[in-house]
Image: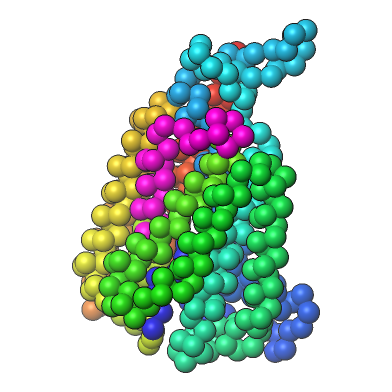
């Protein structure tokens, strides 16, 4: 029985993907694996929005939501060395390019590690119920994936040391939680019968990853998380839950043996209700976060629009035509992906460029 997987599975295909190659070898094997289990073309834009939002939001919080940031020059007036947001303290004129790079690459590796951890955790069930997946069918081995996991960890370690060695503390905390997840916190049997608790315990990795992404900006600056970051992290938690629930709502004919989708374990109405509820909770947290950077109205309008679309999708799913829902699981996945992009762009790049980068004087 497969239960909630990480966010990195949000756009991945749960059905067999047929390849024209019968026995791929060498690099081709890995190309097929990423296409089926960790499609970079699908994940990279979401991870980029996620990581850049974290960096920009942290910087904007440290600028105290000021619409105008005044430059500070060095002695001869030739170089910008900082900026004053409220007349009392100086901050960097903007997030450093290095912070963006480290945040993006580290987050991409985190989500890949989540996928690999799931391959280990679900190997027995996948072999029984989903033998078409890459590992059960022998495309790649768990040993090889373990090597990829280790290489990714080394990359994260080197990036942290390159940018700011104090990042290692948060990196270790996130790795530790990920290790606990991979073992289902050593209470697998107890957790698997409690679907909501299982999901929350696994989605708690999201604010940890987000905290690490923000720390690439604030760790070398203030040295501590800026006030107001809590709402941003809480929005990440509920957003992860929305993606997780959305990808596991299906039509009856699309259900698979051994896959405990929420449309099965909770029923159609409760599953849709839970999806809408966590979207609404994300909306509330995002609005509180947006007030900290003086951007609440645009975020409210943008997310409110997508939430309206989600309500329509939910209503269409619960209404039937010829005895089957009018929309299938792909509609929920696509809406969740759109919601994620709007959420993170609305709390990151868009307010940064519209209220800060273009108003620096």
Residue 234 on the magenta segment: yes
Question: On the image, which quarter does residue 3 sit in?
Answer: bottom left
Residue 202 on the magenta segment: no
Q: Is residue 138 above or below residue 175?
A: below
| Residue closer to the observer: 63 or 274 | 63
In the shown orientation, is residue 183 left or right of residue 309? right
- Scheme by which the image is coloured: rainbow
Q: Is residue 161 visible?
A: yes
Q: Residue at x 29, y 67 (%)?
A: 196
Image x and y of residue 307, in percent: 32, 48
Image x and y of residue 140, in percent: 66, 82
In the shown orientation, is residue 178 left or right of residue 339? right
Q: Quadrant of the C terminus?
A: top right
Q: Residue at x 46, y 32 (%)?
A: 226
Q: Is residue 185 above or below residue 73?
A: below
Image x and y of residue 105, in percent: 65, 52
Q: Is residue 51 visible?
A: no
In the shown orientation, is residue 220 left or right of residue 87? right
Farthest bottom residue in view: 128
Image x and y of residue 144, in percent: 69, 78
Q: Is residue 269 above or below residue 355?
A: below
Q: Residue at x 69, y 12 (%)?
A: 73
Farthest top residue in view: 76
Q: Which residues are magenta?
A: 219-241
Q: Residue at x 51, y 35 (%)?
A: 224
| Residue closer to the observer: 214 or 267 | 214
Q: Quadrant of the N terminus?
A: bottom left
Q: Looking at the image, how many numbered discs can be counted on the residues?
A: 0
């Amino acid at each position: 029985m497969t239960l909630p997987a990480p966010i990195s599975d949000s756009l991945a295909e749960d059905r067999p993907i047929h390849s024209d190659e019968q026995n791929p070898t060498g690099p081709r094997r890995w190309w097929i694996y990423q296409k089926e289990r960790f499609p970079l073309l699908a994940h990279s834009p979401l991870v980029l929005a996620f990581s850049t939002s974290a960096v920009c939001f942290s910087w904007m919080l440290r600028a105290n939501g000021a619409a105008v940031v005044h430059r500070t020059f060095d002695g001869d007036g030739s170089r910008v060395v900082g900026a004053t947001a409220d007349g009392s303290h100086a901050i960097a004129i903007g997030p450093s390019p290095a912070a963006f790079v480290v945040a993006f690459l580290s987050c991409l590796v985190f989500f890949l590690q989540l996928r690999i951890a799931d391959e280990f955790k679900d190997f027995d069930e996948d072999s029984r119920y989903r033998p078409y997946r890459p590992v059960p069918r022998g495309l790649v081995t768990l040993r090889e994936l373990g090597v990829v996991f280790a290489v990714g960890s080394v990359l994260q370690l080197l990036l942290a040391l390159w940018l700011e060695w104090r990042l290692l503390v948060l990196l270790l905390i996130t790795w530790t939680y990920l290790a606990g997840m991979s073992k289902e916190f050593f209470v697998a049997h107890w957790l698997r019968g409690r679907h909501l608790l299982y999901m929350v315990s696994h989605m708690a990795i999201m604010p940890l990853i987000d905290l690490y992404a923000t720390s690439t900006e604030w760790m070398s600056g203030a040295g501590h998380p800026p006030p107001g970051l809590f709402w941003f992290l809480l929005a990440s938690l509920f957003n992860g839950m929305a993606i997780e629930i959305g990808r596991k709502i299906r039509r009856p004919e699309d259900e698979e043996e051994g896959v405990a989708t929420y449309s099965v374990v909770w029923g159609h109405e409760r599953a849709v209700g839970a999806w809408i509820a966590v979207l609404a909770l994300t909306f509330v947290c995002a609005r509180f976060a947006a007030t900290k950077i003086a951007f609440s109205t645009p975020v409210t309008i943008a997310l409110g629009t997508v939430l309206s679309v989600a309500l329509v999708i939910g209503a269409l799913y619960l209404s039937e035509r010829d005895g089957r829902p009018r929309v299938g699981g792909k509609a929920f996945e696509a809406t969740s992906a759109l919601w994620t992009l709007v959420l993170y762009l609305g709390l990151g790049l868009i307010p940064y460029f519209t209220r800060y980068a273009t108003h620096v004087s």
